Amino acid sequence: MEVPNSVFSFLTFLLRKIVNLLKKFQPGTLEGTVRDSTGRPVFGVEVTAGGKTACTARSGRYAIGDLPPSILQIDLSFHGKTETNIEQVSISAGQKLELNLELPASLDPRRISTPEPIQIQLVPEIRTAPDPVPLVQPVPTPKLPLHPLPPAEPGSLTGFLRDSDGNPVTGIDVIVGSKSARTAKSGKYAIVDLLPNTYQIDLSFGDKTEKNVAQALIQSEQTLEKDLRLPISLGGAVTGIVQDSAGKPVVGAEVIIGSRKVLTGKPGKYLLNDLPISTLQIDLSLGDKTEKKVEQFSIQLGQTLEKNLRLPISLGGAITGIVRDPNGSPIPGIEVFAGGKTARTDHSGKYLINDLPPRLVQIDLLYAGQKEPNVEQLLVKLGQTLEQDLSTAIRSLLR
């Protein structure tokens, strides 16, 4: 029995769809190097991300595979101590992400001084007879005045604040101890007159503050350069629901903003955070189709925008084909109805109906006031264009 070309094309298209869908769920890989504050690689550090852990080699390198596409929190453990939420990164399907890390001061034993224990030795008391009083009293030795050590000279801290794309971030308060400085247009900050000590660095914008973004060891008369990464909580974010033309939520659509992307969930909802502070555009992808610049917006620091999106016609389901009479000749001017939408055949008998909702639709034909219902029934899927030629079985339709 010979398989019709339309069935073979449909099966081929369906197989390609399944392959593309599987690609979207391919796991990602996170790798990089862990170094201390002097830039030397650190051996034996446990790096944890997405519930998986890897230990750094002597070169400081680590690699964690089989990670699901998501936003991951990075934790570090070393010598029995753990520091959580060192970094937060977004990994996409099949992505191989390079992330180099600096060992926090709290985990570096070389930067934590432990005082030596004081040993006390008990000496038995020996009673002796008092010395005889000399006839000539000795002249007392004059006591020299004690000169205290000069106080340690203060140091300073400087660097650049950037977002996850490497763009400079302006207007953020960098807080170190009791001192602070606001980043300039270039993202640069500078804090002076810091007494030698290990400091926690906090970032603040508006009513939001992110604690312990990094740590800095300030030494006397030293200017430490420390570049900082803007945390997700202070970056911009966009959320909303993707709907089709009928107002129903669309599951599995890919929302793309720059290098960040996410699939819509069951209620059609999406969330993209850690966005750069600029004018951005939203692209939508479904199956093997992508629609550019569905929406454009500007976002500010710490702002979360709500952007509900309407699925473009190009990404909705579509049906096309040729309407023929029983003899196989194309018929122009016939109205084709499907899913509440209509199209009229052209001179070659061809029709096209798009922006169809994903469901089973019935195709009706209308010609010269006469209707032929339920000529065909087709299962429409989002992002899919079905080819279906139609034939009028009722001759009265053509009279």
Image: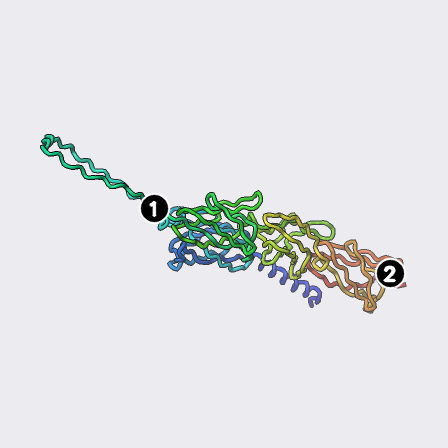
- The residue to which callout 1 is attached is 150
Q: Name the image quarter holding the C terminus.
A: bottom right
In front here: 312 or 273? Answer: 273
User: What is the number of the mark on residue 367?
Assistant: 2
Which residue sits at x=38%, y=46%? Answer: 80
In front here: 326 or 288? Answer: 288
> SS at mark 2?
strand
Q: Amino acid at mark 1?
A: Pro
- In this figure, which colouring scheme has been used for the structure? rainbow
- Residue 295 position within the rendered picture, expressed as x and y whole percent measured from the top left: 68, 55
> SS at mark 1?
loop
Of the two numbered discs 2 and 1 in the rendering, the one whose residue sits closer to the viewer: 1
> Crowding at label 2, few (<14), some or many (≥20) Cα neighbours within 10 Å?
some
- Residue 106 position within the rendered picture, expressed as x and y whole percent measured from the top left: 40, 47
Q: Earlier in the sequence, mark 2 or mark 1?
A: 1
Q: Name the image quarter holding the N terminus.
A: bottom right
Q: Where is residue 146, by image quadrant? A: top left
In front here: 369 or 177? Answer: 177
> Which residue lies most toward the right here?
399
Visible residue check, residue 254? no
Visible residue check, residue 229? yes
Q: Where is residue 147, by image quadrant? A: top left
Which residue sits at x=41%, y=46%? Answer: 195
Which residue sits at x=52%, y=47%? Answer: 203
Q: Amino acid at mark 2?
A: Tyr
Are circles 2 and 1 on residues that touch, CB within 8 Å? no
In front here: 308 or 5? Answer: 308
Left or right of residue 207: residue 346:
right
Measure how far apart labels 2 and 1 are at the Cα level: 102 Å
- Residue 35 position within the rendered picture, expressed as x and y whole percent measured from the top left: 41, 56
- Residue 163 position within the rendered picture, expressed as x and y whole percent measured from the top left: 55, 54
> Crowding at label 1, few (<14), some or many (≥20) Cα neighbours within 10 Å?
few
